[in-house]
Image: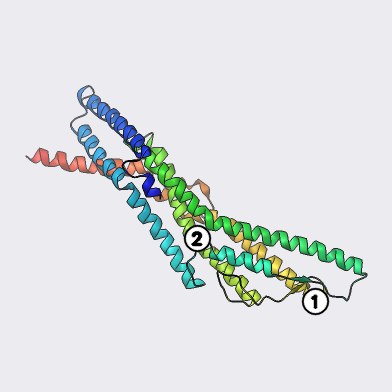
Amino acid sequence: MLNTVLAGGSIFTKHVGVIFAAMMALALILAIYKYVILNKGIGVILEFVFRALILTLVLSTFGSITSMIWGWGNGVGSAMQDAMIGGTGMMAPAKFIWHVSTLIEFTTVDGNLITNAVNIIVSIVIWFILMVILLIVTVLSYIAAVWPILAYAIAKPIGYFLIPFLFFEKTSELFDGWLRLFLHAVFYCIVSRVVLSVIVMVFSAYFQIGYSPSLPVGLKPIVLVGAGLFDIIAIIVICLVSILALLGINSMVAAIVNGSAFGNYGGGGRVLGGGTSKMLNAGTSKMVGMVVERMGRK
């Protein structure tokens, strides 16, 4: 569906095409000014030509390239999920966690309690706390499953729109920011599947039920007070650790994309080698150097 948006005949691509042509014209005027007025040499013209050719190629293949990268990330995540718990459904682990939480039955037992009233109050309080924690785990699980899809769907058309800004180094910083967002979505897809698979393995082992994307069966009632207190504490601890793991996905992905220390968001995208514009400048400068050198030999 996203590739349809980037199809050649869509209104969106026509708008981007106009911006691309305008930015190319400005870059050409600037190159001519440097060559004629500032006497910078033929290199500035050649650099513009190579940059225009590269960006034209990027614009025409952007949809295929981004789909290929996303498909790779999704494929790696699916393979890891399948190896860990079986199945490749992106929403399946979150559904399993939700199904397990809905199947937990709460009962009370008599003994070691002052009165039945205390029994009821303690049961209600513990039930409420556990339900809130389980609800948080479920919501975060669905967010972890859905977020990379939404981020990719948002990033793809925005990246296509920002390609014309690569003609100039200052405006290319916009594309650098987009590239970090896109890579964040790709690696989030991988890391979130691993984290969700680990949580599913823990839930499955504790409740002694096999993983299934459909509604699992076989859960025994969890006793709220008395003999079941240890079970309640264990479930709360498992849920709290799961919450920390789900909240930590973003930090893990940021550490990968930014190439920085774990959880440090100040890396500035070191994995990008200093920015898309610098890499593009390095590439075009090298090609210009080769051409000028050959022209000099002749």
**Residue 234 is drawn in which quadrant?**
bottom right
Residue linked to disc 1? 227
User: Which sits in the foreground, 175 or 281?
Assistant: 175
Q: Is residue 84 visible?
A: yes
- Residue 241 is tagged as none
Where's residue 154, x and y in %? 46, 46
The mark that comes first in sequence, 1 or 2, is 2
Residue 72 falls in image quadrant:
bottom left
Number of numbered labels in the structure image: 2
Screen quadrant of the C terminus:
top left
The amino acid type found where label 1 is placed reads Ala
Label 2 packing within 10 angstroms: few (<14), some (14-19), many (20+): many
Lateral position of residue 93 relative to residue 62, left or right? right
- Towards the viewer: 132 or 46: 132
Q: Secondary structure at mark 1?
A: helix
Q: Height in image: 81 above or below 45?
A: below
Considering depth in this image, is 286 or 185 the residue closer to the camera? 185
Rendered view: 290 above or below 212: above
Above or below, 256 relative to 239: above
Across and down, in percent, residue 118 comes to 89, 66
Its colouring scheme is rainbow
Badge 1: how crowded within 10 Å, few (<14), some, or many (20+)?
Answer: some
Specify the farthest residue to the right.
115
- Where is residue 288 shown, x and y percent of the image? 20, 40
Q: Are marks 1 and 2 in contact (CB under 8 Å)?
A: no
Q: Which residue is mark 2?
A: 191
In space, the residues marked 1 and 2 are separated at their CA atoms by 38 Å
- Residue at image location 25% in from the left, 38% down from the top: 52
